[in-house]
Amino acid sequence: MRVLVSGGAGYIGSHTVLALVAAGHDVVVVDDFSNSKPTVIGRLESLSGAHVPVHSFDLTDADKTERLFAHEQIDAVIHFAGFKAVGESVTRPLAYYRNNLESTFSLVDAMNRHGVTRFVFSSSATVYGEKAPVPYREDYENLSSSSPYGQTKVMVERVLSDVAHISEGWKVALLRYFNPVGAHPSGRIGEDPQGVPNNLMPFIAQVAVGRRERLTVFGDDYPTADGTCERDYLHVEDLAAGHVAALEHLDDMAEPARAFNLGTGTGTSVLELLRAFERAVGRELPYEVGPRRAGDLPAFWADPTRANTELGWHATRTIDDMCADTWRWQSANPHGFPDA
Ligand code: UFG
């Protein structure tokens, strides 16, 4: 298939581009590089051996989106592009709703005009909110999220599901990611957050490489085995493979829209992840315990049974693989991707 990957220069998008090319698909990237560097593309081309055509614009521009579909032959869309910082979304809610919803509307409109009916959406475990029983299962109905960012995921899932149900031939996979970490085993691409990392793994990696003094563990008085929060970390290479599996499953899907958890099914605590990273680096890393971060849930992980059985997808990489690959990327690229 010829797949339009929105946000294909970003962390998960770039790894998925490589997985798509390796599986024999053609890729077209659309990215406005607002949270990624154009130098990613050259690395994708050298790693994949394929030309990666890039359209550089903001998908909330419906006219440009329409022109892209008029110009390129597209069989399917994987939609990663979006604002994704939970904390920032609380202070800039309208920017998050506008960007994450408008970009989806532009894509859906252009797809409808050009007869493209296959859609894979980058959703998040955050749609399960605070009350869903753990492990999270896709048949949980009361989706809601405490942050505007998470709420855009709930809303876009609903928009796509409603569109798919009334549009002839539409098939939508809603992929609910747990906590993606790790990097391509080449060490050539990986997560490159701008500014202070919000997420645990890139923060630990920057401590290890000397860019940050120490990790602050946000609370050690949670009702978990060691008192720190537990999350379902999955390797970005497994996650990328999950997108290929979902894409290739769309035509066989009985329902117009279906959600799939992409996670390992096990929780790992903040301190366990730190210890694993220390094993990868071969030395201890400095940390202190600070107060809880507002909005953090004590522990959650996926029930990945649906993705296992229906997509034939399983997360296979271990926490040690995730840390080793993150460290290879971070140590070879201490300041992330070069500007040019
Ligand atoms: N943590 C620290 N110190 C840090 C950063 C994080 O102790 O410097 C802790 C957090 O308190 C949490 C755990 O590490 O307990 C994981 O935090 P992340 O920010 O890495 O991940 P979250 O689970 O909070 O967030 C992720 C995604 C979001 C998504 C959310 C809910 O990044 O996009 O899961 O599904 F919304």
Image: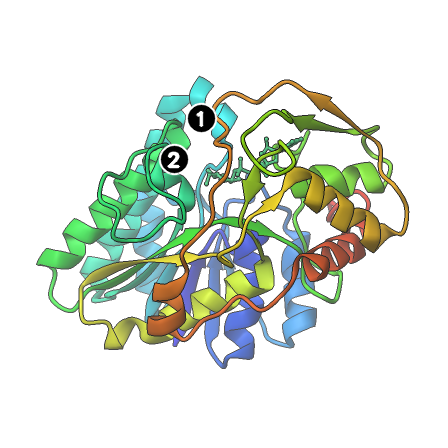
Residue at (50% x, 24% y) in the render: 88
Asked if disc 1 is less than 8 Å from ligand 1, the answer is no
36 vs 223, nearest the viewer: 223
How many angstroms separate mark 1 from mark 2 (CA)? 9 Å
185 vs 9, nearest the viewer: 185
Q: In x, y percent, where is residue 117?
A: 23, 65
Residue at (51% x, 33% y) in the render: 298
Quadrant of the image for the N terminus?
bottom left
Relative height, residue 28 to residue 88 (above, below): below
SS for callout 2: helix
Asked if disc 2 is less than 8 Å from ligand 1, the answer is yes
Relative height, residue 180 to residue 318 (above, below): above
Q: Where is residue 47, by image quadrant?
A: bottom right
Residue at (50% x, 29% y) in the render: 296
196 vs 234, nearest the viewer: 234
Crowding around mark 2 (Cα neighbors within 10 Å: few <14, some 14 to 19, many 20+) is many
Residue 256 showing in the rendered view: yes
Of callouts 1 and 2, the N-terminal one: 1
Relative height, residue 65 to residue 49 (above, below): above
Q: Quadrant of ligand 1?
A: top right
Residue assigned mark 1: 89
Residue 53 showing in the rendered view: no
Q: Where is residue 100, by image quadrant?
A: top left
Residue assigned mark 2: 150
Q: In x, y percent, where is residue 308?
A: 40, 70
> Which amino acid, by three-letter code, is at mark 1?
Ser
Q: In x, y percent, where is residue 281?
A: 85, 51
